[in-house]
């Protein structure tokens, strides 16, 4: 399958350098990479040209944008010309280029038809690139943003996923982690789907994300079956198949917990643990391999079997298993803290962009923040406020205001923000109801008082009991 995510996977993990060319009918794109990172991109698509991007982001005035052809200089790119003429700041140009490069790449994700060609290039000459974009983030953002396509299922359904590196495991949602935990290297993709209660579209997109982030490898189901048949037949051929298998398994040991090593769930009973151990022992016991193997391979085989044995010894002992589970839970809690820190950083970046009036950019950071942490009302509130500034996103803004209210029913800003949104949509009755809610929590709320036409006077502030009483009585109506 020729798809942008497949190429990004190869470019990023193999640290390739060169130009990826995409052509489809009247679409031409040239995407430059250095050491696996995106450093520059060119396009012939009007919506992705730098002038259009700068105007859309509010970096260029409408007048300058209308007359942008007057500013084009021979042998000088439009960005440099605009900076030299003082029409935009250097910082604004870099922001625009960053956004443009991302969009040029991300807009390729819906395409499963078209011609890709990667040209290795050792040197880009004297060109100085000021921007480096992590290609793994492009993979993640692109797959999340794209709609499900049948090509994903065709690419994945008859193959067996095998867990690999967990480098990007922390980026997964809880739903995605649940799918990932069911990958044991034995069941095919469609068999795993049948065992889960998840929407097929989510499953195939998640599996594709795992593959493109190198969280899993994919083996052909037919080849695996042939390998097992050989293992039962000729001992020499079977050993050759197993050696390759044990080397691959060894490469993943550092990322696997004891449950994953044995291929059992956290709720597995003692009988299941024993069965899993004996199944693994029949495959990885050192006595099953030829004695004339290189010492390096023998050590890997020994390491694998030692880890399998250790996993069995711990999980088959009630006391040791309980202690181990406590440690695992602690590590997962630490992972969650790391995710929370990342979400907070994205929230702060979005807040800065929002204050600068860069709403589309802010919304990108905020969508990532709420994906990482779904329990922060302040994240949903700022996302809703940002989306309310973009006409095409008003429906999403309403949903996120309501989510913010669910999380923080005591915050008057959530009700006031929703009220302003309803007012802009021509729904005065709904707007007034929200302003009244804001005022019931904070009688001095300026926006609510202004919108309801209430003049300042001597009024007794309502206590917490009055506020909660009003909120819950309103919910019953």
Image (cartoon, helix red, strand yellow):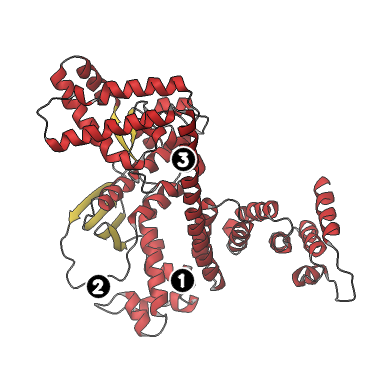
Q: Are marks 3 and 1 in contact (CB under 8 Å)?
A: no
Q: Is residue 184 visible?
A: no
Query: Residue 388 or 248: which is nearer the viewer?
Result: 248
Q: Is the residue marked by circle 1 packed among few (<14), some (14-19), or many (20+) residues within 10 Å?
A: some
Image location (x, y in percent) of residue 357 = 55, 71
Q: Are marks 3 and 2 in contact (CB under 8 Å)?
A: no
Mark 3 and mark 2: Cα distance apart in space: 40 Å
Quick one: SS at disc 2? loop
Where does residue 116 sit, x and y in percent of width and height? 25, 49
Residue located beneath label 1 in the image: 55
Reading the chain from its start, which is encountered first: label 3 or label 2? 2
Q: Mark 3 or mark 1: which comes first in sequence?
A: 1
Q: Is residue 148 above or below residue 91?
A: above
Disc 2 crowd, CA 10 A, few/some/many (<14, 14-19, 20+): few
Q: Which residue is mark 2?
A: 128
Give me the residue at 37% from left, 80% from top: 82
Q: Earlier in the sequence, mark 1 or mark 2?
A: 1
């Amino acid at each position: 399958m020729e798809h942008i995510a497949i190429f990004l996977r190869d470019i990023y993990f193999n640290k390739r350098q060169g130009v990826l060319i995409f052509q489809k009918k009247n679409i031409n794109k040239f995407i430059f990479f250095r050491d696996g990172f995106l450093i520059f991109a060119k396009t012939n698509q009007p919506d992705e040209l730098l002038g259009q991007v700068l105007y859309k982001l509010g970096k260029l005035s409408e007048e300058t944008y209308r007359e942008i052809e007057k500013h084009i200089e021979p042998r000088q790119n439009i960005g440099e010309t605009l900076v030299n003429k003082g029409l935009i700041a250097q910082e604004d140009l870099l922001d625009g280029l960053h956004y443009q490069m991302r969009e040029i790449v991300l807009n390729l994700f819906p395409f499963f038809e078209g011609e890709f060609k990667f040209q290795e290039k050792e040197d880009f000459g004297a060109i100085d690139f000021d921007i480096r974009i992590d290609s793994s983030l492009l993979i993640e953002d692109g797959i999340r943003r794209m709609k499900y396509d049948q090509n994903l299922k065709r690419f994945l359904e008859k193959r067996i996923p095998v867990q690999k590196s967990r480098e990007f495991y922390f980026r997964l949602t809880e739903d995605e982690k649940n799918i990932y935990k069911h990958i044991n290297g034995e069941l095919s993709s469609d068999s795993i789907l049948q065992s889960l209660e998840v929407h097929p579209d989510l499953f195939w997109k998640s599996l594709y994300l795992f593959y493109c982030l190198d969280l899993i490898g994919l083996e052909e189901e037919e080849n695996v079956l042939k390998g097992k048949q050989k293992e039962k037949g000729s001992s020499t051929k079977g050993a050759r198949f197993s050696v390759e298998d044990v080397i691959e398994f060894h490469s993943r040991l550092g990322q696997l917990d004891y449950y994953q090593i044995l291929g059992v769930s956290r709720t597995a009973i003692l009988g299941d643990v024993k069965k899993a151990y004996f199944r693994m022992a029949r495959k990885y016991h050192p006595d099953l391999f030829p004695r004339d193997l290189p010492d390096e391979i023998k050590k890997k085989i020994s390491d694998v079997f030692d880890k399998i044995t250790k996993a069995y010894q711990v999980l088959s002992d009630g006391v040791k298993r309980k202690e181990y589970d406590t440690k695992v839970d602690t590590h997962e809690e630490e992972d969650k803290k790391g995710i929370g820190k990342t979400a907070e950083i994205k929230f702060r970046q979005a807040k800065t962009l929002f204050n600068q009036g860069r709403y589309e950019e802010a919304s990108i950071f905020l969508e990532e923040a709420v994906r990482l942490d779904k329990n922060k009302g302040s994240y949903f509130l700022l996302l809703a406020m940002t989306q309310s500034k973009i006409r095409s996103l008003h429906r999403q803004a309403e949903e996120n205001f309501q989510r913010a209210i669910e999380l923080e029913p005591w915050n008057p800003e959530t009700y006031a923000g929703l009220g302003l949104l309803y007012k802009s949509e021509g729904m005065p009755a709904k707007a007034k109801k929200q302003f009244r809610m804001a005022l019931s929590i904070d009688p001095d709320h300026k926006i609510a008082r202004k919108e309801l036409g209430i003049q300042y006077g001597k009024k007794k502030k309502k206590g917490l009991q009055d506020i909660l009483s009003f909120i819950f009585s309103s919910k019953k109506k």
